[in-house]
Image: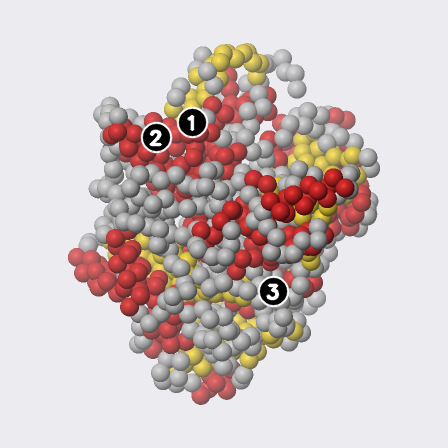
């Protein structure tokens, strides 16, 4: 994709701002719904919503908002855009401070759209004052660096230190310096902290080096040679491993899972139509803009690691295990984290161990900051996956059987593959009702760098297959793709593949219809027919995808986590939230503050929250799985209740009465600490069986339909998205700006995965470890992403919230592939749909 | 490390004259961050792709990861630390920052663009911002923050 050079021609014309309405490259061009700045014209949106109301769908209790704008239009917007806490309700409005937090109206004649609490750390990020790990001053710190094997598989025979540097100046660590077991503590303990005698992937760490000068570290790394007796690597997860490639049990399988409902084989035999398909999705690199980094030091016998991470207690457990220490001898502190998306879920444990080993040996602080190439090469990525569908329908287009077979590339170590596979297969049958479902899943060992968590966690892979397949089925059955989905969408009282009864009152058909309405699906189909017939080089298409995303940990995961959270009442009356849930851009601080402020009826300014330090915060579980606002947010509410209880107050007591009681408590209990606590409790009626994979896989689900319009240039085979609509029901929206930002950011990552982002592999290592040739979308590559929320409060989530973070990753892939298939008639069964791949598909289709 | 090859450079930094010894290989980004503790500019890629390291070189946005420090001798460098917080309320309200790693660079380009509205006659905001990668926002929050800012400039201009 094109990047814009910085030497813009600066026109000498002064005066008013010229609007690029007719710019031929403006993504909004030719789209009647947009105004000059690519905004949605409010009139059009109101019309759409009027149309939508005519359908039998949206129920009155749903509050709707659409568009990516916040009201700088010509129509009143307060009925559309809402701040949930601003609606007339029993709740106190005090969490919306009129002075500091309300958005100022641009023009006096318009009602100002409200923002509850603006991002707490927003100004410090905007002004560059936020200090990330690499920004912390550490005068006496050494730089740490890693020597890696560069061979995908084999026995390490020798480590040769060269003579280009004076090794006496360096601190050098290898596996013999590890005080405890040489294992990274995670689901399994198969991954060594530092390879001792065997390498299973290209970027396996073997030796660590520290020196005061970073450049000297680089020279030293280049001066170490690791001699490996190479053995045949397993490099293609789609093929069965040959005998010489077997490295685990007798089949190289990390995990095999099965979901079974009804009798799928018999139903397929009796089905009126059976449609088969094979789908594939590639790896994806997180590209958090802040690379991974960690500082470690030893303080009064305690090993302290401080850095960029999602899950401080994962790091605690890893340090305890490999350094052979108890919990009082390790301390983990998060620094402001510049993006995670799953990439900083488990890898920071490895990095913290490396920094800690160097710091222990050097007896000085050691700082390891990966540069972009090392980060892209060595850290985890999204699991590549291949999914086969065999689907039976009756003569009316009703699903009667789904046989789904999922294979995921796990890479060299187990990491999180079993749970990624689990979430993947549970989502594989989609938001549809079907009596006979058989899902087989496996995660396979290969000698690729381990794959790990990435937003969506297996679900985007299987939902790509499912939703692309639904369009293929629709075409074969001669049924309209929207209609086919409408016929089969799960209704209240029906069961999922795991036998979970869905009964949440959400009108899923309304979600589907609103997305179709908002993108003007039918009108666009008609308009494209003539456009495609007359345009010599351009082809347009439209497609959609219907999906669901389970919120929180899978199955009994939340029960096993037993997450805890505390609030502390300080002597000045302020309340601090003590939680290991991390802020990494998604808005944890803001949302927790809002929840606590609203629950106690006190001002957001009287709530304190900061980066977690495990010496102060309890384990609230990892910051993953779209669980933070919903699950941990509920703990914030309950810990606030507990605080009130310790003060002898009932839950109706709010506001100044609470802060006064906190101050009074401190007056009579000088030098003591006042806490409120909460621990996760399973909502009633949720049951899961890990052995049979039956029951309530998730407490609740978000429901969504995303629709995309694409344009393909037949001269370059480049596809671009020219319009995108994301409609979802995610319980209650707690903060409109943050929620919209989560959706738009997730959609952007999804568009990148669908069209641009391709990991090129060589011997199980990523070849294009640079932002020069691993391409993520720029602002010029994306259209405005139009977002609508339908609300249906979830009883067990904080303030009615469900999870939101991962959901937007699921929809763009299949919606875009369907739109490309619609535009140019190719099968589009693999993403990313790069120009090379589209060219190949077109050649095949037209051969 | 002390290095006999060090070069003395004098330039203007955020309006003040400065003199500093640097190694020939030092990038402006490293000098700012590690020698001068101006850590607002970030390293996202180190090769001119992401724009997280954006500073102004004689008033024009430039990637400080691509500039050897000795080359800015006699020039004017401005960093994110020179931007006042009150210029950024539109971007805060629009959701222009999430994780904040791209943000200093985004803000530098955005503020420059707001000072050069004539660019919008020939380029879209989306094109002008394409040198700053953001992985969190999907760009809508950023674009909105800029267009809102331009809009309020426009309003103020009309009113006066
Ligand atoms: S760090 Fe300079 S452009 Fe990315
Ligand atoms: S806000 Fe995270 S990269 Fe832009």
Q: Chain of mark 2?
A: B
The image quadrant where one finds the N terminus of chain A is top left
Q: Is mark 3 within 8 Å of ligand 2?
A: no
Identify the residue shown where x is 46% and y is 38%. Answer: A99
Q: In the image, residue A613 lies at what x, y percent? A: 69, 42
Q: Is mark 1 within 8 Å of ligand 1?
A: no
Query: Which corner quadrant of the image does residue A305 belong to?
Result: top right
Q: Secondary structure at mark 1?
A: strand
A753 and A561: which one is in front?
A: A561
For residue A136, above or below residue A174 = above
Identify the residue shown where x is 44% and y is 61%. Answer: A791
In the drawing, what numbered circle is on residue B114?
Answer: 2
Which class describes the residues within 10 Å of circle 2: few (<14), some (14-19), or many (20+)? Answer: some
Q: CA distance from mark 2 to mark 1?
A: 16 Å
Find disc 1 in the rendering and name its residue. Answer: B62
A526 and A764: which one is in front?
A: A526
Query: Which corner quadrant of the image does residue A302 belong to?
Result: top right
Q: CA distance from mark 1 to mark 3?
A: 46 Å
Considering only order in the chain, which callout, 1 or 2, is on the residue closer to the N terminus? 1
Q: CA distance from mark 2 to mark 3?
A: 47 Å
């Amino acid at each position: 994709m094109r990047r814009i050079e910085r030497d813009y021609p600066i026109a000498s014309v002064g005066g008013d701002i010229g609007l690029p309405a007719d710019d031929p490259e403006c993504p909004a061009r030719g789209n009647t719904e947009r105004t000059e700045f690519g905004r949605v014209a409010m009139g059009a949106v109101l019309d759409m919503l009027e149309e939508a109301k005519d359908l039998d769908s949206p129920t009155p209790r749903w509050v709707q908002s659409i568009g990516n704008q916040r009201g700088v239009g010509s129509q009143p917007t307060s009925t559309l855009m809402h701040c949930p806490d601003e609606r007339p309700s029993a709740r106190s409005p005090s969490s919306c401070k009129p002075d500091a937090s309300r958005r100022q109206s641009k023009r006096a004649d318009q009602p100002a759209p409200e923002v509850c609490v603006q991002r707490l750390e927003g100004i410090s990020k905007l002004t560059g004052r936020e200090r990330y790990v690499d920004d912390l001053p550490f005068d006496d710190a050494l730089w740490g660096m890693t020597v890696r094997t560069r061979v995908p598989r084999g026995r390490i025979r020798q480590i040769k230190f060269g003579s280009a540097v004076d090794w006496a100046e360096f601190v050098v660590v290898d596996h013999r310096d590890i005080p405890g077991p040489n294992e990274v503590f995670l689901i399994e303990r198969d991954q060594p902290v530092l390879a001792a005698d065997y390498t299973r992937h290209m970027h396996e760490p073997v030796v660590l080096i520290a020196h005061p000068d970073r450049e000297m570290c680089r020279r030293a790394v280049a001066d170490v040679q690791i001699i490996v007796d190479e053995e045949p690597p397993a490099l293609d997860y789609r093929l069965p491993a040959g005998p010489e490639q077997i490295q685990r049990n007798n089949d190289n399988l990390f995990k095999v899972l099965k979901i079974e409902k009804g009798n799928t084989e018999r139903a397929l035999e009796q089905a009126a139509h059976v449609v088969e398909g094979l789908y594939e999705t590639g790896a994806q690199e997180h590209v958090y803009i802040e690379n991974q980094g960690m500082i470690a030091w030893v303080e009064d016998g305690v090993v302290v690691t401080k850095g960029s991470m999602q899950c401080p207690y994962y790091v605690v457990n890893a340090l305890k295990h490999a350094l052979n220490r108890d919990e009082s001898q390790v301390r983990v502190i998060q620094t402001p984290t510049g993006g995670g998306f799953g990439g900083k879920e488990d890898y920071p444990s490895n990095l913290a161990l490396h920094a800690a080993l160097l710091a222990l040996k050097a007896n000085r602080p050691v700082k390891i900051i990966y540069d972009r190439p090392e980060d892209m090469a060595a850290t985890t990525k999204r699991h590549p996956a291949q999914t086969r569908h065999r689907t039976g329908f009756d003569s009316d287009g009703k699903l009667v059987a789904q046989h789904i077979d999922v294979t995921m590339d796990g890479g060299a170590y187990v990491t999180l593959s079993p749970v990624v596979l689990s979430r993947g297969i549970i989502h594989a049958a989609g938001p549809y009702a079907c009596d006979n479902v058989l899902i087989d899943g496996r995660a396979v060992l290969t000698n690729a760098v381990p794959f790990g968590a990435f937003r969506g966690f297996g679900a985007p892979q299987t939902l790509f297959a499912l939703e692309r397949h639904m369009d293929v089925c629709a075409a074969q059955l001669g049924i309209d793709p929207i209609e086919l989905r409408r016929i089969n969408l799960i209704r209240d009282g029906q069961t999922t593949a795991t036998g979970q009864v869905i009964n949440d009152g959400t009108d899923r058909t309304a979600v589907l219809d609103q997305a179709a309405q908002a993108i003007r699906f039918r009108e666009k189909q008609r308009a494209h027919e003539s456009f495609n017939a007359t345009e010599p080089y351009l082809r347009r298409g439209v497609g959609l995808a219907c999906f669901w995303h389970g919120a929180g940990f899978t199955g009994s995961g939340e029960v096993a986590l037993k997450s805890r959270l505390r609030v502390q009442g300080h002597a000045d009356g302020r309340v601090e939230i003590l939680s290991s849930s991390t802020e990494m851009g998604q808005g944890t601080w803001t949302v927790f503050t809002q929840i606590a402020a609203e629950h106690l009826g006190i001002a957001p300014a009287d709530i304190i929250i900061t980066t977690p330090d495990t010496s102060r915060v309890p384990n609230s579980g990892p910051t993953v799985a779209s669980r933070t606002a919903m699950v941990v947010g509920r703990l914030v509410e309950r810990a606030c209740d507990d605080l009130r209880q310790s003060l002898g107050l009932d839950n109706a007591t709010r506001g100044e009465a609470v802060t006064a009681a906190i101050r009074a408590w401190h007056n009579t209990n000088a030098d003591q600490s006042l806490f409120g606590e909460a621990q996760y409790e399973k909502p009633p009626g949720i049951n899961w069986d890990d052995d049979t994979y039956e029951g309530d896989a998730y407490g609740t689900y978000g429901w969504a339909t995303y629709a995309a319009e694409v344009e393909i240039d037949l001269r370059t085979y480049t596809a671009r998205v020219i319009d995108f609509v994301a409609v979802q029901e995610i319980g209650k929206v707690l903060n409109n700006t943050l929620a919209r930002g989560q959706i738009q950011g997730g959609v952007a990552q999804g568009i990148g995965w669908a069209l641009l982002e391709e990991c090129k592999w060589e011997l199980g290592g990523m070849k294009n470890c640079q932002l020069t040739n691993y391409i993520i979308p720029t602002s010029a590559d994306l259209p405005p992403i139009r977002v609508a929320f339908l609300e249906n409060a979830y009883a067990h989530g904080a303030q009615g919230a469900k999870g939101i973070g991962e959901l937007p990753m699921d929809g763009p892939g299949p919606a875009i592939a369907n739109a490309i298939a619609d535009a140019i008639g190719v099968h589009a069964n693999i993403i990313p749909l790069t120009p090379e791949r589209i060219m190949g598909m077109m050649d095949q289709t037209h051969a | 490390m002390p290095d006999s090859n060090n070069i003395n450079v004098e330039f203007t930094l955020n309006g003040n004259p400065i003199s500093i010894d640097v190694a020939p290989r030092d990038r402006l980004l490293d000098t700012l961050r590690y020698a001068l503790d101006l850590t607002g500019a970030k390293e996202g890629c180190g090769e001119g792709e992401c724009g997280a390291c954006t500073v102004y070189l004689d008033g024009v946005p430039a990637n400080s990861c691509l500039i050897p420090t000795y080359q800015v001798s006699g020039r004017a460098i401005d960093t994110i630390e020179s931007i006042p917080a009150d210029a950024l309320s539109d971007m805060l309200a629009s959701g222009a920052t999430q994780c904040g790693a791209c943000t200093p660079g985004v803000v530098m380009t955005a503020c420059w663009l707001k000072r050069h509205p004539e660019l919008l006659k020939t380029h879209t905001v989306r094109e002008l911002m394409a040198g700053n990668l953001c992985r969190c926002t999907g760009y809508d929050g950023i674009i909105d923050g800029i267009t809102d800012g331009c809009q309020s400039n426009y309003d103020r201009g009309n009113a006066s």
